[in-house]
């Protein structure tokens, strides 16, 4: 048994002062330090630094580790030039991204308090790293393939990767999951098969959706910049699906859609009606010039996520939340900071079906300790000060173990 004490503890209902948490690999009790010391006299007492705040470990729902080698190879500013540069440099970037580099990024995420992340995997190369990473990993095996001629082969490879991740579930912190690359890159037949697999095995499901105006023009009219892209690389000028058909494929299973910056209000309302959610990646959206997700009007839950280093400069969840504060300048800043913290803790856990994200009895003992530079003068501003001033957390625990 261990007991950790902090000046403040974050809960979904707000911050509570001068409380402590007793835990093993799960949270056993929350109360005053005196009461818990009396009840658990043999417990190891962990006292945090002055002005510390105990958070549940943060959850980054959407990361691409396989592009961690990118620094200046890919072109930012607009989606299609970026996509062309991905095609041009993909082999070099994936080839130079070895296990040590990916593990380094996992450790960097841990230093920013990320105790769980969703790894979007196109090839399965990250599985060995994710098995050894200190964090919990929702391992999203990504399905891609719009050419009907190769659909069966691509689906077969996808299912092999799904089975490989399933085999890791009992021996590691891996949760197997399924990702759909995008409406323009996955044939509807194998898309439906993949959704059925997620339903059958109750696996978390995510999909990139309406990230750019080019995607919208292609899906709606078969025109725009993606038309030339598909003609050049895939010798086709006809999209395999449309926006409505793609959305309807997920009607019976809650899905975490990524980006959605080009979705209109009707489409966002439809996703909300069907119980879906959104992974919001503010820096990626800005760097690729695709637009802003209007989180102030959303009727469905969202998470803040970093995306990968193919469209970002770090995998820090605090860097991402600070970017969101700057991007969404019409939302009152205190309200926004509170919403962002909820999006990377309890909301993210609920969306991914995980038993963490809250400091409550029975939840997994995943914690991040943030130490403020000075004592907060007003408790209602703790959320904002935590987001603005934190570069790295002071302590981090996964499953009750200190890293």
Image (tube, grey):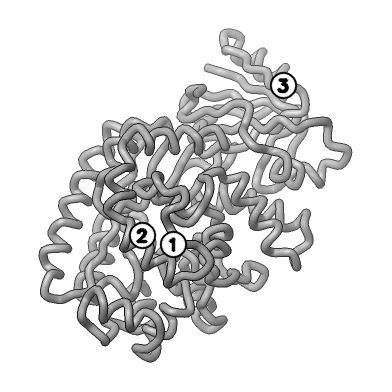
The quarter of the picture where residue 242 lies is bottom left
Could you classify mark 3 by the number of other residues whose Cα lies within 10 Å: few (under 14), some (14-19), or many (20 or more)?
Answer: some
Q: Nearer the viewer, residue 247 or 3?
A: 247
CA separation, marks 3 and 2? 39 Å
Provide the secondary structure element on which disc 3 rests: loop
Residue 168 coordinates in the image, percent (x, y): 25, 38
Does residue 62 appear in the picture of this structure?
no
**Among all residues in the image, which is located at the extreme right?**
377
**Among all residues in the image, which is located at the extreme bottom?**
221
User: Where is 331 relative to 306, above or below?
Assistant: below
Q: Earlier in the sequence, mark 3 or mark 2?
A: 3
The quarter of the picture where residue 233 lies is bottom left
CA separation, marks 3 and 1? 37 Å
Which residue lies at the image location 24% right of the left edge and 76% below the top edge? Answer: 188
Q: Earlier in the sequence, mark 1 or mark 2?
A: 2
Of circles 3 and 2, which is in front?
3
In the shown orientation, is residue 168 left or right of residue 48?
left
In the shown orientation, is residue 184 left or right of residue 390?
left
Residue carrying label 1: 256
Residue carrying label 3: 49
The answer to whether the residue labelled 1 contacts the one labelled 2, judged by CB atoms less than 8 Å apart, is yes
Provide the secondary structure element on which disc 1 rests: strand
User: Where is 204 relative to 193, above or below?
Assistant: above
Residue 327 coordinates in the image, percent (x, y): 67, 62
Which residue lies at the image location 33% right of the left edge and 44% below the top edge? Answer: 175
Q: Which of marks 3 and 1 is nearer the N terminus?
A: 3
Which residue lies at the image location 70% right of the left edge and 58% below the top edge? Answer: 326
Residue carrying label 2: 205
């Amino acid at each position: 048994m261990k007991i950790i004490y902090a000046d403040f503890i974050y809960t979904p209902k707000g911050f509570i002062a001068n409380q402590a948490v007793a835990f093993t690999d799960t949270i056993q009790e929350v109360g005053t330090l005196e009461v818990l010391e009396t009840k658990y006299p043999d417990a190891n007492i962990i006292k945090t630094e002055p002005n510390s705040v105990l958070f549940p470990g943060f959850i980054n729902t959407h990361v691409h580790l396989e592009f961690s080698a990118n620094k200046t190879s890919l072109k930012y500013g607009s989606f299609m030039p970026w996509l062309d540069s991905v095609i041009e440099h993909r082999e070099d970037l994936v080839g130079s991204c070895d296990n040590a580099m990916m593990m380094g990024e996992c450790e960097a995420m841990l230093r920013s308090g990320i105790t769980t992340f969703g790894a979007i995997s196109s090839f399965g190369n990250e599985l060995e790293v994710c098995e050894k990473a200190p964090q919990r990993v929702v391992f999203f095996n990504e399905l891609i393939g719009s050419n009907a001629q190769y659909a069966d082969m691509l689906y077969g490879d996808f299912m092999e990767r799904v089975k490989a991740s399933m085999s890791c579930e009992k021996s590691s912190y891996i949760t197997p999951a399924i990702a759909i690359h995008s409406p323009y890159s996955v044939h509807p037949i194998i898309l439906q098969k993949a959704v059925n697999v997620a339903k059958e095995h109750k696996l978390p499901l995510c999909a990139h959706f309406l990230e750019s105006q080019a995607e919208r023009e292609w899906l709606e009219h078969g025109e725009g910049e993606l038309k030339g892209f598909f003609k050049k690389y895939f010798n086709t000028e006809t999209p395999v699906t449309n926006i409505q058909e793609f959305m309807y494929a997920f009607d019976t299973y809650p899905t975490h859609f990524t980006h959605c910056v080009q979705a209109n209000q009707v489409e966002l309302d439809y996703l909300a009606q069907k119980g879906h959610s959104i992974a919001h990646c503010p820096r990626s959206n800005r760097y690729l010039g695709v637009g802003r997700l209007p989180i102030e009007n959303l009727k469905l839950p969202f998470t803040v996520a970093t995306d990968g280093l193919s469209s970002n400069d770090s995998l820090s969840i605090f860097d991402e939340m600070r970017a969101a504060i700057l991007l969404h300048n019409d939302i009152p800043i205190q309200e926004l900071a509170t919403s962002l913290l909820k999006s990377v803790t309890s909301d993210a856990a609920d969306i991914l079906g995980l038993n963490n994200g809250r400091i409550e009895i029975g939840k997994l003992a995943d914690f991040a300790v943030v130490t403020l530079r000075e004592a907060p003068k007003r408790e209602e501003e703790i959320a904002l000060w935590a987001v603005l001033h934190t570069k790295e957390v002071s302590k981090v625990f996964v499953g009750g173990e200190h890293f």
